[in-house]
Image (spheres, rainbow, N blue to C red):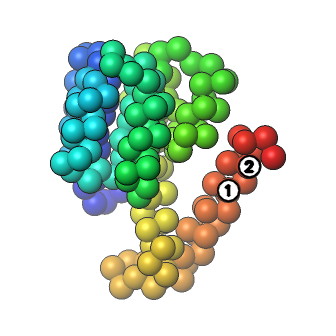
Amino acid sequence: MSEKAKILFVDDEEAIRSLILTVLEGDGHTAHGVGTAAEAVQAAGNTLYDLVVIDKNLPDGSGIDLLRDLKRKHPETEFMILTGYPSLESAIEALRAGAFDYLIKPVLDLDLVTQKVSRALERRRLLQQAYRGGDDPAGGGPDAAAQAQALVRQAGALRAAVDGG
């Protein structure tokens, strides 16, 4: 992604937060890290983020509940859940709550993190172009609109599969 994105990273583990923030900033993004759900709500109230990555288990609440709350307030923002205790049930719950993707700790493959962040930001960009009609003079156009529509159809099919129908 060529433009700089604003990313909020929510994790109570300082070492992971520091590592991921360094990676995101190294990729040219503006990254901000917090350790609690309350701090995340405050940060999201002050800044419109392009992407928010949330640890599933926070000291003051559920990362999934935080995702739901922030998604209601900021539907244009993409979200990812990070967990050290992965399960199929929690992955489905995260996707149903509105997460674009699901990351597993320990985060050993930093290239994978970069790829997933790039995909989430690209999805956000394409959906914004589709919402604007696709003929955006800033680089949209019919091809981008068609890609965005295809992405929306894929997301709908994935959502239907996750929801069981």
Judged from the image, the secondary structure of the residue bearing numbered disc 2 is helix
Q: Residue furthest right?
A: 165
Q: Position of residue 12 (x, y in %)?
A: 29, 18
As measured in the structure, the alpha-carbon distance from the residue carrying label 1 to the one carrying label 2 is: 6 Å
Asked if disc 1 and disc 2 are in contact, CB closer than 8 Å, the reply is yes
Q: Which residue is mark 1?
A: 156
Q: Amino acid at mark 1?
A: Gly
Q: Which mark is residue 18?
A: none
Q: Residue at x 61, y 40 (%)?
A: 96
Q: In this rendering, would 131 be left or right of 22?
A: right
Placement of 142 over or under 71, stated as above or below: below
Q: Residue at x 28, y 60 (%)?
A: 3
Of 121 and 33, nearer the camera is: 33
Q: In this rendering, would 63 be left or right of 21?
A: right
Q: Position of residue 52 (x, y in %)?
A: 36, 41
> If the image is split into quadrants, where does the N terminus sit?
bottom left
Q: Amino acid at mark 2?
A: Ala
Q: Which residue is mark 2?
A: 160
Q: Quadrant of residue 43?
A: top left
Of 162 and 142, nearer the camera is: 162
Label 2: few (<14), some (14–19) or many (≥20) C-alpha neighbours in 10 Å: few
Q: How many marks?
A: 2
Q: Residue at x 49, y 57 (%)?
A: 123
Q: Position of residue 108 (x, y in %)?
A: 42, 20
Q: Quadrant of residue 138?
A: bottom left
Q: Position of residue 152 (x, y in %)?
A: 61, 62
Residue 21 visible from this viewpoint: no
Residue 76 visible from this viewpoint: yes
